[in-house]
Amino acid sequence: MRLVNQRRQTISMRQSIFEPIANFYSQGAYISVSDGNGTGYAATSDTSRSGLKKAIQRAQNWANDNSRFQLISPTTLPRPKLSGQYHSPIAQPWDSIDLETKLEEMRKIDQRLNIHDVIVDWWVVFYSCQSEIIFVTPDIELQQSFSYLTPYLGAVANNGRETQKRTFGIETGSQSGYESILNADLGYRAKIIAEQSLALLEAPNCPGGNKDLLLMPSQMILQIHESIGHPLELDRILGDERNYAGTSFVTLDMFGKYKYGSNLLNISFNPNQPQQIASYQYDDEGSPAKREFLIKDGILLRPLGGITSQSRAGLSGVATSRSCDWNRPPIDRMANINLEPGETSFNDMVASIENGILMDTNRSWSIDDSRNKFQFGCELGRIIKDGELRGIIKNPNYRGISSDFWRNLKSVGDPASFAVLSVPTCGKGEPNQAIRVGHASPACVFADTDIFGGGE
Amino acid sequence: MKQIKQSFFDLFQQLSDGLLDDEILLANALAEDSDFVQMNYGKIRNAGSVHQIQISLRLILENRQASAQFNIGGNEKDDLNRANHVIESLRNQIRVSPKDPFLLINTEIHNSELIATDSFSETHLIIEEIISSSKGLDLVGLFSNGIIYRGFANSLGQRNWHSRSSFNFDWSCYIHTDKAVKSRYSDFNWNSERFLAKIETIHKQLEFLSKTALTINPDNYRVYLAPAAVSELMMTLAWQGFGAKNHKTQQTPLQKLASGQVNLHSGVSLFENNADGLIPGFTHNGFKKPPLVTLIDKGQLCDMLINSRSASEYNLSVNADIEIPESLDFLAGDLARSDVFRKLDTGLYINNLWYSNFSDMNQCAITGMTRFACFLVENGQIKAPINPLRFDDSLFNILGNNLEAISIDREWILDTDTYERRSLASMRLPGLLIDNLKFTL
């Protein structure tokens, strides 16, 4: 049984007007029953004794009805044996700060966004979430509590001919308290994105051609997410997601030998990265989570899959069986999937590029259902010519094929450019689930990438 | 069914009775009793039920407001305690909240009730039938079944209730790797004959799909987009295409259409068809929706979707709950089903598109992938299945000069979205014959 109690609050300001405060409280229980060869679940918002009894009976009925048709016999699955706790590290709990203080902070940021008549829309949003989860089986009891905070700023400019947008913050969501708002220097960030939205209106279109591509961490996280994270999800490889989220070009026989990328590519599953959004001690099947390399020196080592998928596949994975709330079963997800820093400074990376483009902050993402052919677009680009950063360009896009792309990884930034970031909503699963995912990465350079600008 | 409805209205009445002077309370119920059966390799991967009742309260006092959504369990005393606790917390928040200049609620009382009356087989019996009828097929997908409830009440006396019982079977059958035929079967009552007919169609399409797949070079191709493929384009356009706020802040991808710089094909007419859709006829602020909102009329941009906040800000009339179509209706054309392959002649027959996104919103340019059963057609005959291709083209081309024909037959596609809860959205779409669709990878 998994009991979840979640509290979310969104406070927002758009075009200098406070929007209604939105509170969200979710409380319910997920109960899974295994009986013989059958398994079933029932989820209920009725957490009274009688409500839970009814849910247990419903889950039992499913287990009985399913036993003849079940894909996986529960008798073959291992059961975690370790009890424990986890609590997000927070300095200033969200609720300990009064509302007036938060509104005043937003006012200050708002003033830095509305800097010109051509800025037609702007906003400041603080998303907070606190969640407590109790997980109980006949063998173990787990208690975990999480506190998440995400700021989101945006400035939209229009000159009568076109619209350009710059945003900041949605990728910086973390496990933290109000201190992350104060430490993020959001007023300065607001000023920068407002100015950049104006500059983009006057900027030339991104030039096309095959060039070196320098991706900032704010875009690297999407690249990692779509073309490494999803393909390594074991339930995709095992076919569960083929009708919805898709399959994977990765097959079971590739683990331990497939050359996923250049020797510079090191990808870790790191549930212990301090304050990263998907840190935890135990996944939602009750397995203890620990740091492991998924890809080391370019070689594919492990998939992302919890004990159920590991048992089906006959592979060792990592504890990433997660559910978004009490009303959904756990499935194989990404958690903190990070690209480990290398040794090249940002300046040296730029200096090494004769003809290339820098891209910052994702704005468009698309990839095929096997996670091969992708296309991404960014909010802002800069030309790199003869080892120097030049002017801003608009509508930067690039496309490629996952395996070729990662093999063209030619430079990985040092710890100075390493940023611990996140993707706030990753959609997957039948029934659907949206979940927080962490990614950290330094800036990276990819050779010979198909780059292009906006279309006419 | 009655139990949830009565629980919601009884709870609301007690909360309403406890309001302080000049306070106004609005409430919404979002509830479901749903079964979800996930299948893989023709077997059950995961099966269960979700019983959830969520109540949303909006407290208003002197143009200040705050809202909260929470679950109730069904125990009257516990639920009332929880709701009173929520209201007290909203009161505290309102005290320090600034006045909201764009607050707008409905004050004209109109009550309504739509109660689900359909009855159908229990889920496990349908699953048995699906498994026995699809023997030999590598079937994967999700069967959802149950009752969805929506309710509204305000302290001015308005009461609305809306419940629908329906099932949605969204599945595909694979031959190998990424080669599969996708199908959907959604309705209020399960009909075995209709399901068997769909299985028969799948078998036929799998025969075509079993041929060696061709890898097509990126280029411009003549294509027929089946309704499911059109739905992917419409979903992408719907994000920001029709909302008043998006138009007023120049963030719609249809800016060039709005300013008259481009025109769409005169056969393109799009509506928000509230009358024929499954969603409630009332908004979460209690406004009654018009039966039909014309979004594009004969290629010309027409009305926007306007929620209560935009209505207040821009002095417009409310015609939508959210500023995204939930019952999109694309007017049929004159292309007969029997003529599709002949008119396509040589090109690509695309059953499904996937993972679309704007590549350049100013140009209304969308990129995405082909998925599932897509075929190369030569001289009106299917030649071979094709491997996934990436397209990147402007909807101003796709629905403009390059649009050659719109099918007579339309498909009513019920949204299979189950994020947080089962969706009630739907689209009724034709297929489109398009010349020179640009493929890039």
Image: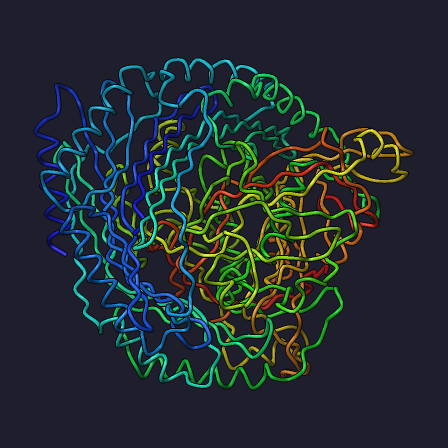
In this view, the residue in front, B398 or B204, is B204
- Position in image of residue A24 (x %, y %): 32, 35
In this view, the residue in front, A271 or B111, is A271
Name which residue lies at 40% across and 23% down: A93
Where residue A63 sits, quadrant-wise, is bottom left
- Left or right: A368 as drawn, with respect to A3: right
- Position in image of residue A285 (x %, y %): 41, 54
Res B108 visible: yes
Name which residue lies at 79% across and 31% down: A346
Q: Is residue B142 above or below residue A185?
A: below
- Left or right: B31 as drawn, with respect to A371: left
Name which residue lies at 50% across and 70% down: B407
User: How many numbered callouts?
Assistant: 0
Q: Is residue A137 above or below residue A179?
A: below
Where residue B356 sits, quadrant-wise, is bottom right
In this view, the residue in front, B394 or A305, is A305
Q: Is residue A44 above or below residue A133?
A: below
Where residue B90 sits, quadrant-wise, is top left
